[in-house]
Amino acid sequence: MKTTEYRCVLIRPNSCTVLVFSDNGRYRLPRISTLAAMRSARELQKAIKAIWDLNVFILEIRAASTNVDPLAFAELRTSGVTSPLKEIAIRQLLELGLSEDEMDRVELLIQGRTENSLAKLGWIDAAIAWIESATGRTFGSSKSIEQWNAGGGFALFRACSVEGRSYWLKATGEPNVREFGMTCFLCDLYPDFLPKVVATKTEWNAWLAEHAGDSLPDLPSAAELASAANRMARLQLLSCGRIN
């Protein structure tokens, strides 16, 4: 199966350092390969944890360009480092051959001057605080966060509380900003067909919903497919006439 290799810029917040490999005094960025058909943020977060035992939150992913692999920016959520990676100052990234545009992006992230609030260092802390306030539950740390999407004004992750309750936070950017209003509208009209929305945050174009149900298996049975199709068809029939 086709894979994509990512260069990873793992940023330590508040210290202006990143993690790299050091080979005889020469630095290189860590790299992760994932299946091309899978969700990049989810696979990167899982792989970085599995390979180097590092908890991270993916901030954004920059697409590949001519002869250059894609670049993933992530915020380190692990206080110590027991992996073979070492910390270096941001300015030393120039030795790794990053382009001027890529270096500018790193500096914007470090300085908190990105136009996308969801890609800022520390945003996940604000998100967890909001989830705790909305649910009245405790979420120990961002280690309980399972990312599914990141970057481009989008965010999708599942958070599990200390008590074991799961919630989904989703935020959408262009060209899908209308998904926020549409989802809230459908949840109000047809609560039996959608997960319960617990809270919304318009400045993030985001909503928080209770976990409800599970994904179909990779090889669903005919009965499972028929059940899902039937539910979707019933929702479509109920919503006929709601064209606005």
Image (spheres, rainbow, N blue to C red):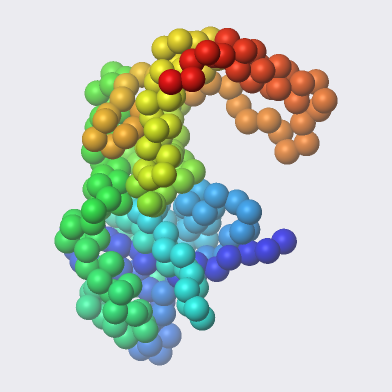
Q: For the image shown, how many numbered marks are present on the structure?
A: 0
User: From the viewer's perspective, is residue 51 above or below residue 124?
Assistant: below
Residue 192, image x, y percentages: 53, 10
User: Is residue 117 something one can see in this rendering?
Assistant: yes
Instruction: Specify the farthest residue to the right.
Output: 222
Can residue 209 be seen here? The reply is: no
Would you identify the image quadrant in which residue 233 lies? top right
Q: Residue 139 or 202: which is nearer the viewer?
A: 202
| Residue nearest the observer in this picture, 99 or 89 | 99
Q: Quadrant of residue 182?
A: top left
Question: Which residue is pictured at 63% across the width and 31% down the height?
Answer: 215
**Residue 234 placement (x, y as % from top left):** 64, 13
In this orientation, which residue lies closer to the viewer: 78 or 109? Answer: 109
Please provide percent x and percent y for residue 124: 30, 43
- The structure residue drawn at horizontal position 49% and vertical position 43%, both measured from the top left corner, is 148
Q: Quadrant of the N terminus?
A: bottom right
Residue at 41% from the left image edge and 49% from the top image edge: 150
The answer to whether 67 is drawn above or below residue 85 in the figure is: below
Residue at image point 43% right, 20% down = 244
Which image quadrant is residue 199 in? top left
x and y, in percent, of residue 35 in the image: 63, 58
Is 222 placed left or right of 91 in the picture?
right
